[in-house]
């Protein structure tokens, strides 16, 4: 299922737009997750060039990168570790109804001071690439890692 929204147009800037973002997150994204219970959810937009991970990749914990919004279903929570995910240094980290974990690394649309939370720090903490692999310069530190922090290559 693909849900697409032009975030900058609808969510940035004003209090009314921030309220739309909150509604989108609480009702649309979390509501869809509650209904479908996917293994993994990530947000991407037309700026991200990484392909969506396949089911085989997700089941093998080969998640290509940390995105602006990530939901780890209970099976992935078990593989990564509940405490490890809950302690991720992101802007919003919360446990969902089915014990899945929502991680939003940065506050992209709200009042949080710019730079307070960084996707790169959260990705490094979780052992994931901070940006989609196709945007990286093939640097060694952008290769996905397994849950133990070891490189898969």
Image (cartoon, rainbow, N blue to C red):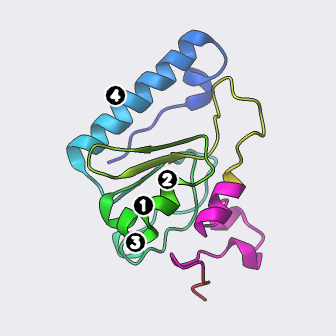
Mark 1: few/some/many CA within 10 Å (<14, 14-19, 20+): some
- Return the x and y of residue 72 as percentages of the image width and height: 40, 57
Q: Does residue 20 show up?
A: yes
Residue 129 among those drawn in magenta: yes
| Residue denoted by label 4 | 27
Q: Pointer 1 and pointer 3: residues touching (CB < 8 Å)?
A: no
In the rendered image, the vertical position of residue 99 relative to residue 60, given as above or below: above
Residues in magenta, as a range: 121-149
- Return the x and y of residue 89 as percentages of the image width and height: 63, 50
The residue at the far left in this view is 35
Query: In what element is the residue under mark 2?
Result: helix
Q: Pointer 2 and pointer 1: residues touching (CB < 8 Å)?
A: yes
Query: In what element is the residue under mark 4?
Result: helix
Query: In what element is the residue under mark 3?
Result: helix
| Residue denoted by label 1 | 82
Left or right of 108? Residue 54 is left
Depth check: 150 or 28 in front?
Answer: 150
Mark 3: few/some/many CA within 10 Å (<14, 14-19, 20+): some
| Residue denoted by label 2 | 86
Q: How much space separates mark 1 and mark 4, taking CA atoms?
A: 24 Å
Tell which tag, 4 or 3, sits nearer the viewer: 3
Q: Earlier in the sequence, mark 4 or mark 3?
A: 4
Depth check: 46 or 103 in front?
Answer: 103
Q: Pointer 1 and pointer 4: residues touching (CB < 8 Å)?
A: no
């Amino acid at each position: 299922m693909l849900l697409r929204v032009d975030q900058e147009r609808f969510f940035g800037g004003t209090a009314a737009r921030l309220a739309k973002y909150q509604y989108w997150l609480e009702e649309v994204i979390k509501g869809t997750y509650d209904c479908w219970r996917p293994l993994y959810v990530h947000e991407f937009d037309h700026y991200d060039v990484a392909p969506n991970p396949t089911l085989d990749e997700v089941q093998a914990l080969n998640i290509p990168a940390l995105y602006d919004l990530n939901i780890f279903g209970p099976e992935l929570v078990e593989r990564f570790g509940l405490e490890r995910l809950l302690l991720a240094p992101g802007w919003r980290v919360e446990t969902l109804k089915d014990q899945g974990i929502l991680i939003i690394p940065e506050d992209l649309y709200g009042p949080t001071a710019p730079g307070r939370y960084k996707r790169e720090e959260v990705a490094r903490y979780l052992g994931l690439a901070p940006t989609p692999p196709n945007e990286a310069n093939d640097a060694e530190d952008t290769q996905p890692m397994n849950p133990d922090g070891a490189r898969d290559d």
